[in-house]
Image: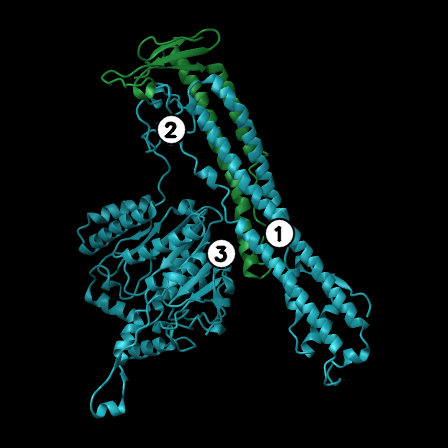
Chain colours: A green, B cyan
Amino acid sequence: MNGTGAGRAGLHGGGDDGRSVMTTGPAAGEAAGSSPGPAAGGSADLIVDTPLLRRVAEMVDHAADALRGDGTCEVFRSPLSDASLGPSAAGREVAAAAGRRVTEAVDGARALALRVAMAAEKIRLAAEQFERAEAGQFPGPR
Amino acid sequence: MSTPQTSGSPGGGRRSDGHSVLRLMAGLQGLPDPLVAADELLAIDADTLAGWFAVARRAAVWLWRGADLLADAIPALAAAWSSPTPRAWITALREAGLESRTVVVGQADAADLACSTLTQVKASVEEELGTAEAAVAALHPADVGAALPGGSPSPSPELQHILTELTARLDELRARAMEALQSLALSLRADPRDPIESLPTVASLPNGDPGAGAGPGPRFPASGGLAPTDPSAVVSGPMTSRPTPADPGPMPIDVGNLERLRLDLQSEDDTTREMAQGVLASLTQAEQAGGVAQLLVYESADSWSQGRAAISVGDISTADNVATLVPGITSAPAQMADGLNDAAALRAEASRQSPGESTAVVAWYGYDIPLGFKGGVSTNPLAKVDSTLDALDDDNAGEGGVVLARDIDRFRQWAPVGARFTALGFSMGSTTVSSAAAQGARLDDAVLMGSPGAGQGVSTADGYPHLPADHTYVIAFDQDPVTQTRTDLAATATSTLLAGPRISGADGEPFGVDPALADFGAQVVDATTNVPEVRMSLSLPGPIEVLADPVESAVVNQWLAISHHSETNYLSGRSKEAAAAVVIGHYTDVPIKPGR
């Protein structure tokens, strides 16, 4: 369902398709800018499809699962010792660096998985808040 | 000679009786032992290296799949939420994953290439050894016999040719292997986590939140990972990354020390308060230098003690490398400015050499530093006398080493798993670091700078339980009188004069063995002083001139010489570059020279 400006922070929607439109304008006491758009204090429509937003959250969850790998909390430890690549300085440097970098590759993927999971959670939260706002459970944005 | 019988050896190489014949022949011919290079190359375990990078390949697959699924989510998100910011947010996550994957795949490819080269090199080594053995076996017995005791005094040209060719070929193979390793080392300098760690937080995204672009959309606390159940958790005001009452963020690791410092700032004891004020000023200085400053150790001063403090320049909890810098005599926790300047300089150099890594440098004023009252807080006269005598031997360094080893254990608990730990000590601080290593401190490397000695009971670098000798580095400027034997002699004489005869260690040296000696067995860094050399000469008139013309003023020159002995001098120029290279584990960048 689409709709347009019904004054400051108007909210329309709640139709069967789950789509809502929020229209915003400058807050009371704020001077409207010379150019349109919310950054300038003008008005803009926010179109939200909460069921689809929830499905997006699931997709992002799947991405987080993929980034976690096989889902185990397997701990990888370098099998390389200081002397594994010979006694030369280059060998020792590579043994140390390789030990760290591979672990960091796994750590990096898992750290990204965490961020992506947080993103999914926030999208889900957004959907929930839009629905609650639409249902009038708490005042519209100030 | 028959085909050599082979047997397994560590690292997957082979060893045969024929090899020892080659070694024997080379020795008798006065040629270098070709098996030294062969052993070094055969010890390289390329299979394990390749197997380890299979784990990196798995991580690359995870990153690829995750990015792929995020790519599917982006158009769906655009349809579900008209604001561009959430899309930008998911796109940034996806791109970070792809960038990280590029680094991982690049490193895995480089490792595969290096492993392939190393495997070929090992096979070639085996082949060359087999060929040389076969060639020796095919020689006329008289040619071989000439090399044996009692044989002909003139060496066999054929045998000499075989061994010379073998040595040259092995040298070539070694150069190939080193080139492969160095190339891989270069590739491994990038940190695959960087693209992910540099992602903006939700709060720092354009306009501050996923709902931006539509004004009143839901906003989310920056650090929250779970959906709040209370609508009040959804805030409408400007977002900041500061902790909120609902989400105070992680507890700082130094919260206890900061609390003690806060209390000491209000202490009625002048000594306690002066030290706290000095530490507070140092924290401010460290924060300006490193963005993050952490008070890792704090113990109050009193009229008998200078107290203890350690401040990290940079965040130890996220550091790839943690260096602990231990100062020498006359330093004090109440006045850490010089040490923090040196710590910041070392950290900056480490960052310059390895931009992809983060390094934290801890200025550790954690032992009872002799003559600390000169730069510290007021202590009572008896404590000053005691502190003066402490400068004449390594007793405080020995006790400080125990404390340092314990503190490093604690630092390791705060640092990421796998962080590299290096302890660097200057002057008496180097003796303290050596003592800590001897006490079993868990260090990856140690750097002893301007050292008067390695401390009692440490006769060689092999004496450190968890620190291999070749991970012990020594920087000793030839112009620095403190690193010379005369320091020990002067200290012994003064100590005897002031406090009576002292029972020294077995070597009779109050600070122990000079670690720059070749016999000590450490890696001596090839670096020169950063202070210009100036010598003072005096021309004296009259009859004296006949006796001494020109007379070098020993006192003045001693004063000039001592200017070489400063922590800042050791952490400047090439010696700083070398120290930083050790801190980040770039061993090939450390210039080494023979010991004294």
Work out whether mark 3 precedes mark 2 in sequence or the reverse, and give the earlier one: 2
Q: Earlier in the sequence, mark 1 or mark 3?
A: 1
State left or right for residue A83 relative to residue B528. Answer: right
Q: CA distance from mark 3 to mark 2?
A: 38 Å
Q: Earlier in the sequence, mark 1 or mark 2?
A: 1
State the residue position of label 2.
Answer: B206
Residue at 74%, 78% in the rendered image: B157
In the figure, is residue B459 to the left or right of B540? Answer: right
Which chain does tag 2 point to? B
Q: Amino acid at mark 2?
A: Pro
Is residue B135 rendered to the left or right of residue A116?
A: right
Give the answer, above or below, for where A48 lies relative to B182.
Answer: above
Return the residue nearer the eye: A89 or B530: B530
Element assignment for label 2: helix
Any mark on residue B586, and which?
Answer: 3
Q: Name the image quarter holding the C terminus of chain A.
A: top left
- Check disc 1 and report its element: helix, strand or loop: helix
Chain of the residue that carries numbered disc 1 in the rendered image = B
- Does the image show residue A15? yes
Determine whether the residue tagged by mark 3 lies in a helix, strand or loop. loop
- Crowd rating for badge 3 (residues with CA inside 10 Å; few <14, some 14–19, many 20+): many
Q: Is residue B213 above or below residue B473?
A: above
Q: Position of residue B452 (x, y in %)?
A: 37, 71
Whether pointer 1 and pointer 3 mark residues with C-beta atoms closer than 8 Å, the reply is: no
**Residue closest to the far top:** A15
Residue behind mark 1: B114
User: Quarter of the image containing the N terminus of chain A?
Assistant: top left
Residue B80 position in % (x across, y down): 47, 17
**Residue type, mark 1 in image:** Ala
Q: Is B32 in front, or is B45?
A: B32
- Mark 3 or 2, closer to the camera: 2
Viewer-proximal residue among B498 and B328: B328
